[in-house]
Amino acid sequence: MRSRKIHRRALALAAVALAALPAAALGSPARAVADGGASAAAPPVASVDLPDIPLPAGHGKQTVTVTYRNDSSTDQTVAPQILIESPDQGPFLDPANVRLEALASDGHWHDMPLYSQTGTLYTRLIPAKTVLPGHHTLTQHYRLTVLKPSPGTIEPVVAIYG
């Protein structure tokens, strides 16, 4: 069963990366040429899976903290991502039934749109990309509210770019 989850997670990450390619290529051709095509739409080279969290029961809220430390001495481009997995046999989650918010630097919660691919709800990576200096830690707080009770798992991930 676990191999299917890894397959869905990889597919969701690939879908996010591929969806961003045309927009970046069409949106800023000068940058794509200037940096040899290594624009913001380049796909991640690796990902770090953080511990899974059960989806809250009922109409509950769940706080999720994504923490990742860059142990190298060089800067690293990373992007936190929240994946919400449906059970392997369904029912599949609907983005309209889950509300995800991120805590911004101004101290306010801001809605995060959720997208759906193969039974997985996910946040986009490209807007979340940040440069994490060497030996620094990224901490991002999220608040997830279940609007319609459903089984599932919250799977935080940190995508790492080359």
Image (tube, helix red, strand yellow):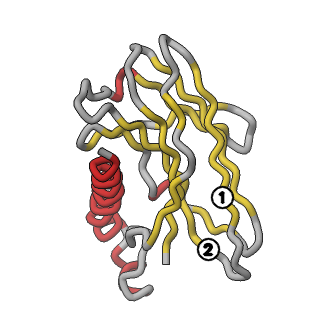
Q: Quadrant of residue 102?
A: top right
Residue type marked 2: Gln
The quadrant the N terminus occupies is: top left
Residue type marked 1: Tyr
Circle 1 — which element? strand
| Residue drawn 73% across the image and 61% down it | 137
Q: Which mark is residue 68?
A: 1
| Residue drawn 26% across the image and 64% down it | 22
Left or right position of 143 against 81:
right
Point out residue 126 in the picture as x, y percentages from the top left corner: 45, 58
| Residue drawn 70% across the image and 51% down it | 139
Point out residue 33 in the picture as x, y percentages from the top left corner: 36, 85
Q: Which mark is residue 76?
A: 2
Q: Quadrant of residue 134?
A: bottom right
Point out residue 30 in the picture as x, y percentages from the top left corner: 38, 79
Furthest toward the top, the residue is: 58
- Disc 2/disc 1 C-alpha distance (Å): 11 Å
**Is disc 1 surrounded by few (<14), some (14 to 19) or many (20+) residues within 10 Å?**
some
| Residue drawn 67% across the image and 67% down it | 132
